[in-house]
């Protein structure tokens, strides 16, 4: 006797093994997202060569990125740096192109959409778009127009 003899295919319960996507509500949620995203980015055909040329120290980088996004999304203090200026050495080594920015944003937003949903996820995507635009302006030496909102990302630990 096969599945067809029993009235159809065997039901699939795989969706019950993984919890449904939740929002980015904890530091752990953010760290998982950061790890998932940068695992993909490091192996990406467009972004991977930039990371390889920069000789990224992944444990340190993942920690700093988790601190950054925990600050941006949860208001947790802990990030100490200027993410815009931090990208200058990599840009000088492998100049970022429109393709790099577009791919980074597409991969970031897809990773979020594949894993989480909710207000913090939406905020992460909005902040990523603003960050990419600000980084592109800075590295291209272009000032924002007078009506563009100013984004200040520099913090110092108290």
Image (cartoon, rainbow, N blue to C red):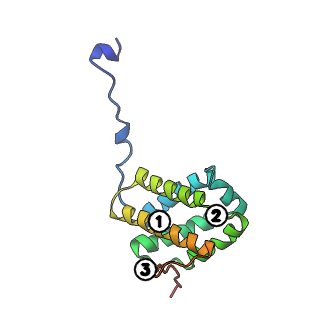
Say whether marks 2 and 1 touch (CB < 8 Å): no
Q: Is residue 34 left or right of residue 74?
A: right
Q: Residue furthest bottom?
A: 158
Secondary structure found at label 1: helix
First reached walking from the N terminus: tag 3 or tag 1 = 1
Residue corresponding to mark 1: 129
Bin the neighbour count of mark 2 within 10 Å (Cα to Cα): few under 14, some 14-19, many 20 and up. some
Pointer 2 residue: 96
Secondary structure at badge 3 equals: loop
Label 2 – label 1 distance at C-alpha: 15 Å
Q: Nearer the viewer, mark 3 or mark 2?
A: 3
| Left or right: 115 in relation to 34 | left
Q: Position of residue 145 (x, y in %)?
A: 49, 78
Gap between marks 3 and 1 measured at Cα: 17 Å
Location of residue 153 with respect to 29 vertically, above or below: below
Q: Residues within 10 Å of mark 3 (few under 14, many from 20)?
A: few
Q: Is residue 60 visible?
A: yes
Residue 4: x and y in percent read: 32, 15
Q: Which residue is mark 3?
A: 147
**Residue drawn at point x = 59 percent, y = 59 percent:** 100
Residue 25 appears anywhere in the view: no
* Mark 3 to mark 2 CA distance (whole Å): 25 Å
| Quarter of the image where one finds residue 94 | bottom right
The mark nearer the N terminus, 3 or 2, is 2
Helix, strand or loop under label 2? loop
Of 44 and 2, the residue lying toward us = 44
């Amino acid at each position: 006797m096969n599945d067809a003899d029993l009235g159809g295919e065997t039901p699939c319960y795989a969706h019950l093994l993984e919890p449904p996507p939740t929002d980015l509500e904890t530091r752990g949620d953010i760290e998982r997202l950061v790890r998932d995203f940068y695992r993909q980015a490091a192996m990406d055909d467009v972004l991977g060569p930039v990371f390889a040329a920069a000789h990224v120290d992944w444990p340190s980088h993942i920690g700093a990125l988790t601190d950054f996004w925990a600050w941006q999304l949860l208001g947790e203090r802990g990030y100490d740096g200027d993410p815009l200026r931090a990208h200058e050495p990599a840009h000088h080594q492998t100049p970022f192109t429109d393709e790099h920015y577009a791919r980074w944003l597409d991969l970031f937003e897809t990773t979020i959409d594949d894993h989480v949903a909710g207000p913090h996820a939406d905020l992460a995507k909005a902040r990523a778009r603003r960050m990419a635009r600000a980084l592109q302006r800075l590295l291209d030496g272009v000032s924002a127009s007078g009506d563009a909102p100013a984004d200040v990302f520099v913090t110092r630990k108290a």
